[in-house]
Amino acid sequence: MAMREADLDRVRALPMFAAASDRTFQSLTAGGFLQKFPAGTTLLTEGDPVDFLYVLIEGQAELQGTWNDKETTLAVLRPVSTFILAAVVLDADALMTARTIERSDILMLSAEAVRRGMEDDAAFGLAVARELAGCYRGLVRTVKNQKLRGGAERLANYLMVEQTRQGGGPTLILPHEKRVLASLLGMTPENLSRAFANLADYGVVVQGPEVTIARPVVLNRLAKPDPLIDGAGPAGDLLAGAAELERTASEARRSQARFG
Amino acid sequence: MAMREADLDRVRALPMFAAASDRTFQSLTAGGFLQKFPAGTTLLTEGDPVDFLYVLIEGQAELQGTWNDKETTLAVLRPVSTFILAAVVLDADALMTARTIERSDILMLSAEAVRRGMEDDAAFGLAVARELAGCYRGLVRTVKNQKLRGGAERLANYLMVEQTRQGGGPTLILPHEKRVLASLLGMTPENLSRAFANLADYGVVVQGPEVTIARPVVLNRLAKPDPLIDGAGPAGDLLAGAAELERTASEARRSQARFG
DNA sequence: CGGCGAATTGACGGACGTCAACTGCTGTGG
DNA sequence: CCACAGCAGTTGACGTCCGTCAATTCGCCG
């Protein structure tokens, strides 16, 4: 199955797999395989039965929903993240389409093996429950963000989150195409342009994919970030797997590594 | 703790508790208590630590989110439903405020006991994982509904779902105040009125809380209901705990009995 | 150099929120 | 028994936000 040792370790370091016994982990990876996909590949289509749990090792993938010939992006995933967990657990049809938006390395684990692992290995089952709880809470935040904030406010908060995620410097690089960002934020590309234009008054300067926040305080006054929507309090780096307060540890990892 | 036998049975019949061992179930209910609340009582406020898993036995409760002095209803619960499960599992702060909107009987189970139960009783832990997976998928549907459909379309679909939930007859009773419904659908009360007015062209007649769908086919053409948004396929009654296809069984119960 | 797609800009219309006035119901108290 | 206050719901006017369509610019790759 052609998988580098280092990649395996990165998967194992995810909270969900860290709890699994060696035996469980081996039975999962034994039946799984790592595959490389070019950008724009559809991995799984809405409504299809789900045969695998996916783990994004390298690249970027997008989860999208469709209705009436309209599409919307529900999440953009970055390594290392699992996705489609909920459908795997329930052996149900997918509610979202999964597509690569960059060349990506993706580990595919047998859904059946995951379910068996949950039954045989109580610690793994517990870890899955906690993972799903975190996913759920991520979506609650998404709904609140969507229903309570206007377009410009969503963008402002996105920028501030992304800023700290990239180290807190005044300038950040948009990690995906603007059309993808627009769909994620629930607007059209045209409207995203206008939203950026509006933020100019708040000290946001855009040059291609490079955004600099010249007056953080002013932007912050518009964005009104809220830990109950935008994520765990003290933030901090998402690098390194160092365990902290165990309560917040898995939660802090929310923006990474989870989207069921 | 003053709890009727019949109520206990109804709790035990929930998929999540049906899987628990007698011992686990007893340890949960032993430390729990049933309480009656008048309408409009706040059970739990956004941001607070969560000490209990709540089970709505009788009445109605509402989960809402707040930001910047704006409120939105994330879900309206009807018996028998558990709520705030995800926060309990992670021992995290609540992301939503819970309020009664009718006189309600609510069972409160120690969050600590629930977490211990998950660790000690693997079958219960699994059931919680499945419950959370169902909750997660419910929210995915909510986000798709919100981002992909316009106000009138959301209302049309709500009416059709509620119609089948109430037996499929041409006329249904709105189960809550219109202002609550408006907030749930992501609009203002004024706009809900107008949305109802628009649906008159599609054969929807409103008289107070009583709505009759005179031309189901026409309304259906507007609503374009989709099993990947509006719920499990063949629908069917939500009464009786009779197990069906085990895959869809827990999913079908989605609109009842779950909202973590 | 030419072409393609992403991004931007402008013009326009529709959907939605806000404010205000009005209706109808209900419960309270004189 | 009636008067009145209070609240849910409705309706209208108005402004804003946002989506759509079209034209243009920019950058990248062939």
Image: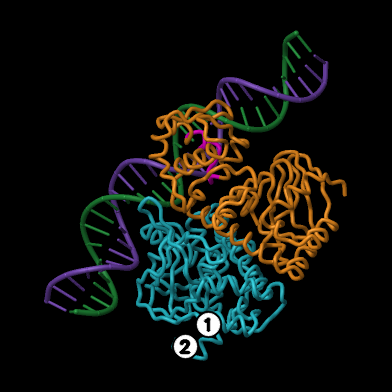
Chain colours: A cyan, B orange, C purple, D green
Q: Give the range drawn in magenta.
A: B185-194
Residue situated in front as seen by the camera: A99 or A171: A99
Report which residue position mark 1 lands on.
Answer: A29
Q: Which chain carries label 1?
A: A
Which percent across, then down, holds residue A97?
A: 42, 63
Q: Mark 2 lies on which chain?
A: A
Residue type beneath disc 2: Met
Q: In this rendering, which labeled residue sits more in front, label 1 or label 2?
A: 1
User: What is the secondary structure assignment of the residue under circle 2?
Assistant: loop
Q: Is residue B70 visible?
A: no
Which percent across, then down, holds residue B67?
A: 62, 54
Please rate how many residues cluster around mark 1, counting C-alpha atoms within 10 Å: few if below 14, some from 14 to 19, many from 20.
many
Report which residue position mark 2 lands on.
Answer: A3
Please rate how many residues cluster around mark 2, counting C-alpha atoms within 10 Å: few if below 14, some from 14 to 19, many from 20.
few
Which percent across, then down, holds residue B179?
A: 60, 38
Residue situated in front as seen by the camera: A18 or A230: A18
Decide whether the magenta segment is chiefly helix, strand or loop.
helix
- Which quadrant would the C terminus of chain B be assigned to in this image? bottom right
Residue situated in front as seen by the camera: B9 or A227: B9
| Real-space CA distance between mark 1 and mark 2, rounded to the nearest whole angstrom | 10 Å
Looking at the image, residue B108 lies above or below residue A17:
above
